[in-house]
Image (cartoon, helix red, strand yellow):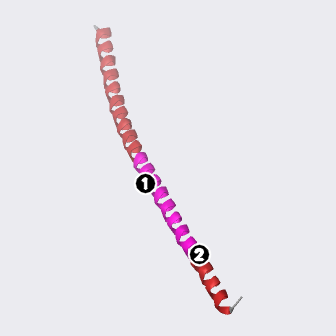
Amino acid sequence: MSLEAQILQLKAKHKAIDGAFQDFQKIIQSTHDVVSLAFKEQREYHGEVEYRLKKLEHLAEQQNKRTDKIEELLIQIVNNLASK
């Protein structure tokens, strides 16, 4: 095999390897994009869940305050009725 043929063969192999590397980079970038999107969606979902949880905790706290006031009023009514 002549030197020129060997050089052409090496150039062809280099071109094939370079093309494969470019394809590999595209696959890695696409995988990165998909994973990033999935993480973004999870962050948004968990953010919304956390917001709703805080809202529910606030509502429960308000309900507890109302229950405490009702309990106080009932105690006052019972004490008032008992004293008569």
Instruction: Name the residue: 45% across, 49% down.
Output: 42
Instruction: Name the residue: 32% across, 14% down.
Output: 79
Give the residues drawn in magenta, as a range.
17-46
Residue 18 in the image: above or below residue 62:
below
Disc sitting over residue 77 in the figure = none
Packing grade of label 1 (10 A; few <14, some 14-19, many >=20) is few
Looking at the image, which residue sits at the far top?
Answer: 84
The kind of residue tagged 1 is: Lys
Disc sitting over residue 40 in the figure = 1
Q: Quadrant of the N terminus?
A: bottom right
Q: If you read the primary sequence from the N terminus, does the residue marked by circle 1 or circle 2 appear first?
A: 2
User: Is residue 31 found left or right of 77 in the rendered image?
Assistant: right
Q: Quadrant of the C terminus?
A: top left
Residue 24 in the image: above or below residue 18:
above
Instruction: Name the residue: 52% across, 63% down.
Output: 27
Based on the displayed image, in which of its 4 quarters is residue 64 positioned?
A: top left
Q: Nearer the viewer, residue 50 or 36?
A: 36
User: Is residue 1 found left or right of 44 in the rendered image?
Assistant: right
Disc sitting over residue 16 in the figure = 2
Residue 76 in the image: above or below residue 10:
above
Q: Secondary structure at mark 2?
A: helix
Packing grade of label 2 (10 A; few <14, some 14-19, many >=20) is few
In contact (CB < 8 Å): disc 1 and disc 2? no
Tell me, yes or no, whether the highlighted magenta stretch contains residue 4: no
